[in-house]
Image (cartoon, rainbow, N blue to C red):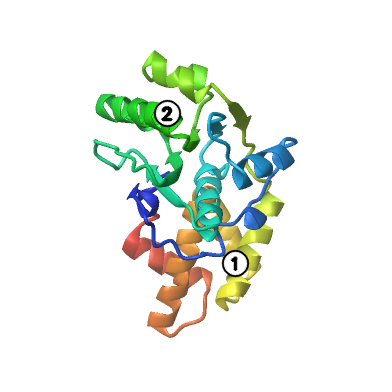
Amino acid sequence: MKISPLSRQVPLDLAPEPTWRLDTFLPGDNAAWPEVQDALRHPRPGVPVYLWGTPGAGKTHLLRAAASLAQARGLRVAAFGPADAPPWELNEDVALLLLDDCQAYGAEQQHAAFSAFVEATSLGIAVLAAGSLPPVDLALRDDLRTRLAWGLVYQLMPPTEDQVRALLRREADRRGILLTDDVMDYLLKRCARDLSHLMRLLDRLDGYSLAAKRGVSVALLRQMLAEGGLA
């Protein structure tokens, strides 16, 4: 998952996008969800949090939600991911460091992440990180893997199909889109179940429908995907 809208040093002009909130996250069968919520609402320096799970489990969603909460309290956030070239530098007024998609870091980014982690520890900056695998299984340098495993490590289970359908329905209603069952079936059968991906598709479909001056239908969705692919 890309984290480009949160990349680089802040201040981040991150609007309170409704889809990036803890209360819009679909916890699936995550028994530890209450603990995860608390850790994200109140990140603590010296106790890093690492979230891992398959694509679509909601890792980036939760990092963005934590960033939004921190900003709402007037705190500064720095966030980095695979799309960001080093160096990754922190200012002393940063209160939260986010490291996303850790499994995709190249050699230079691993060095940058390790340095940022060490600097965050010395400056009392809380760290939240995410990846597709538990720290011990990441193909990263040993010292970075060790630090990612230092604190709280949580596995995120992907949401059930019923939960995904409920989210799509809710977000479609919020956008004023009439999302019929056949359109939703097509989306779920033909497109990745990654929630961020589905939300982007829903935004595209909304804009495409307005531009075409046509209601949302399977035919319109097929036309949009044929013209622009699934990205």
Query: Residue 130: x percent and y percent?
Result: 49, 35
Query: Residue 223: x percent and y percent?
Result: 40, 68
Residue, x 39% and y 57% (percent of image)? 12
Q: From this view, report whether residue 44 is shown above or below residue 215.
A: above
Depth check: 44 or 142 in front? 44
Secondary structure at badge 1 equals helix
Q: If the image is split into quadrants, where does the N terminus sit?
A: top left
Q: Quadrant of residue 94?
A: top left
| Category of crowding for the residue at label 2, using alpha-carbon neighbours closer than 10 angstroms: few (below 14), some (14–19), many (at least 20) | few
Q: Which residue is mark 1?
A: 171
Q: From this view, report whether residue 123 is shown above or below residue 70.
A: above
Is 179 displayed left or right of 84 in the figure?
A: right
Residue 122: mark in rendering = 2
Q: What amino acid type is highlighted by mark number 2?
A: Ser
- Total residue callouts: 2
Secondary structure at badge 2 equals helix
Residue, x 33% and y 62% (percent of image)? 228
Q: From this view, report whether residue 110 is shown above or below residue 171.
A: above
